[in-house]
Amino acid sequence: MTVDELSCSGFARAIAVSELASGKPLHVTLPSGPAIIVLTTGDTNEIVAFSPLCPHQLGNLATGTWANGRISCPVHEYEFDVLSGACVLPRDEAMHLRKYEVAVSAGDLWIKIPRPKWRRD
């Protein structure tokens, strides 16, 4: 997609891809809301973006710990796999991270954060 097509499709420019460090989460704030971006390590080197709010009790994942492709909430230590978004600790939880669509164009990372259904503007 071109930059114009991304803008018209609800994406917002977040950062230059060159600013991402492999395995190091980065917290950004876009006009549509905050997000955490991670360039995963290992075989995939995939860029993922998700809400910084833990789905358990809305802890701030931006201040959580990151290890082995997982992010841990600082409030109750729930852990989530960033590629799948699934809760991996505790094991029986059916929660998932709220992941966002990402795109790369002209060396920039674009994120689409859906507008909340309760907003009227």
Image: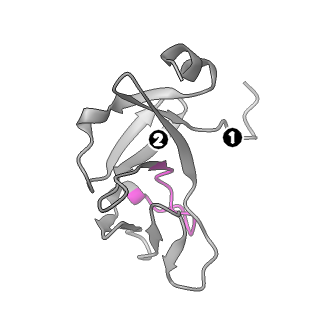
Callout 2, which amino acid? Pro
Res. 14 image quadrant? top left
4 or 25: nearer the viewer: 4
- Which structural element holds mark 1? loop
Relative to 114, is 47 above or below?
A: below
Q: Secondary structure at mark 2?
A: strand
Q: Nearer the N terminus, badge 1 or badge 2? A: 2
Pinpoint residue 68: horizontal percent, then vertical percent. 31, 70
Which quadrant is home to the C terminus?
A: top right
Residue kind at label 1, given as amino acid type: Pro
Which mark is on residue 51?
none
Residue identified by numbered label 2: 34
Report the residue at 30% width, 62% height from top.
Answer: 42
Q: Residues within 10 Å of mark 2 (few under 14, many from 20)?
A: some
Q: CA distance from mark 1 to mark 2?
A: 13 Å
Q: Which residues are magenta?
A: 49-61
Q: Is residue 113 above or below residue 85?
A: above
Residue shown at 25%/52% (left/top)?
Answer: 22
Residue that appears at 24% across and 36% down: 19
